Image (cartoon, helix red, strand yellow):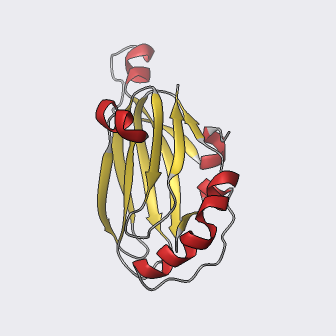
Amino acid sequence: MITPNKFFVTLLLAAPCIGGSALAAESEAAVVVELTQVPCQFLESEQGSNHGYRSSSIKDCEAINAKSGASRIEQAEALQLKPGKTIFRVTNKNVPYELGFWLRGEGIAGRVTLPSVSGGGLITGKTQDYVIDLKPGEYIYSCPLNPTPDYKLVVN
């Protein structure tokens, strides 16, 4: 089980609390989860281990994941977060094509009942924020453009 501190999680205040209570400021706080994409994987999701994959297209990652994806997911630890506003700050580190991020509920029921966030536009060296109000449940996240395995996130 991965706890947030293994994922470079920080707490940000969405707005300054001027003349308000500490409780009001706390309710506006957002958790920031920093994730780094390298070819065919998220580093933090695989205990920071960069497997050194090389990819110039989606097909390269599809072949790599066909060979190693299942075993890598077995070794990956689920990210554990609390419900509430969460910012996934995703960086494209040395992937030579555009990437994205997709967080959604796990399984058919999860996709119907849980919130999701997705987007692209992550060119090499770019960092982008994806904001979501997480509800309790089981999620998966990945990059369909890289592509990466489906990593697990549990909110409770």
Foreground residue among 83 and 57: 57
Q: Is residue 150 above or below residue 126?
A: above
The residue that appears at 66% across and 46% down in the rendered structure is 77
Q: Nearer the viewer, residue 125 or 65?
A: 65
Residue at the outermost bottom position: 56
Where does residue 85 sit, x and y in percent of width and height? 38, 33
- Where is residue 100? Give x, y as percent: 36, 63
Whether 134 is drawn above or below 90: the answer is: above
Residue 120 screen position, x and y as percent: 30, 63
Where residue 71 sits, quadrant-wise, is bottom right
Drawn side of residue 70 relative to residue 58, left or right: right
Q: Is residue 69 left or right of residue 119?
A: right
Q: Is residue 94 visible?
A: no
Name the image quarter holding the N terminus.
Answer: top right
Relative height, residue 141 to residue 14 (above, below): below
Q: Please provide percent x and percent y for residue 42.
A: 55, 61
Q: Of 37 and 24, which appears nearest the observer?
A: 37
- From the viewer's perspective, is 75 left or right of 127? right
Above or below, 28 against 44 in this view is above
Q: Write the residue at 53% across / 25% down.
A: 156
> Does residue 134 show up?
yes
Picture quadrant where residue 64 is located: bottom right
Residue at 43%, 70% (x, y): give it.
146
